[in-house]
Image (cartoon, rainbow, N blue to C red):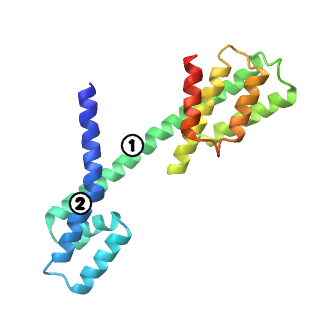
Amino acid sequence: MRIVALMIGVLIFGGFFFSILVYPIWLLVHCAIAENRSTKSKVVWIVLMLLSWPFTSLIYGLFGSKRKLFQWLSGILIAAALVASIVIFSFMNKISGIAQQEMAMTIAKLDQMDTTGLSEAELKELKLSLLVLRDEMKMRLSKTAMEKLAKDISLYKLFYIYIKDHKISGDEYSDWVDKFKSRDMIDRKALERYVEELQMK
């Protein structure tokens, strides 16, 4: 199983390396030495390829080049990129949806837990914070959004650790709320390590 996973990983990395570095350079060289293209056309394509690497390279391969090989490869790479984007978006959206459902159920269970260590104001703030966290888990396809989603999921895990005994103490409340309020500044990896350490106890 590990060998299969390793092979898939090598194929994905190899395909990414080829499409980001090898193929664009190949097309750049092809454009520069093409005999049937004017100097002005070469300069325009080369400048565009360098400015918007590697996207214009794929456009050049698909429409600018007259070689069937480049047209086919560019079409396959563009199609593969679209399929990969759809798969990643669907997967992350599914994770986001599951996380939101779990959070909603957790919020509903708060009233049944032992919260004697918290005041009514603190309990209200806790519920509002959890609602904000749930709404933030709506998936948006960007690097910053995925980073934020990862933090939100870690915060949910931390909260779940604190309430696994069906109660939440004042110290647990303070720790969680502090991390929730500083979630935009807190380091994602540090938060994940903190949660993992608590899970191991």
Residue 149 in the figure: left or right of residue 163: left
Quadrant of the rendered image containing residue 65: bottom left
Residue 194 horizontal/vertical position (percent): 59, 29
Question: Which quadrant would the N terminus be assigned to in this image?
Answer: top left
Q: Which amino acid does label 2 sit on?
A: Tyr
According to the picture, the residue beneath numbered tag 2 turns out to be 23
Residue 182 in the figure: left or right of residue 12: right
The answer to whether residue 121 is seen in the rendering is yes
Residue 76 horizontal/vertical position (percent): 24, 55
Say above or below: 39 vs 162: below
Residue 4 horizontal/vertical position (percent): 24, 30
Q: Distance between the residues labelled 1 and 2?
A: 23 Å
Say above or below: 164 vs 43: above
Residue 62 horizontal/vertical position (percent): 24, 66
Quadrant of the rendered image containing residue 23: bottom left
According to the picture, the residue beneath numbered tag 1 turns out to be 87
- Disc on res. 143: none
Q: How many marks?
A: 2
The answer to whether residue 102 is seen in the rendering is no
Q: Which of 54 and 136 is in front in this view?
A: 54
Give the residue at the far left of this rendering: 35
Element marked by disc 2: helix
Say above or below: 149 vs 192: below
Give the residue at the far right of this rendering: 120
Residue drawn at (35%, 52%) of the image? 82
Q: What residue type is labelled 1?
A: Val
Residue 121 in the figure: left or right of residue 130: right
Quadrant of the rendered image containing residue 159: top right
Element marked by disc 1: helix
Residue drawn at (70%, 15%) of the image? 166
Badge 2: few (under 14), some or many (20 or more) residues near its Cα, within 10 Å?
A: many
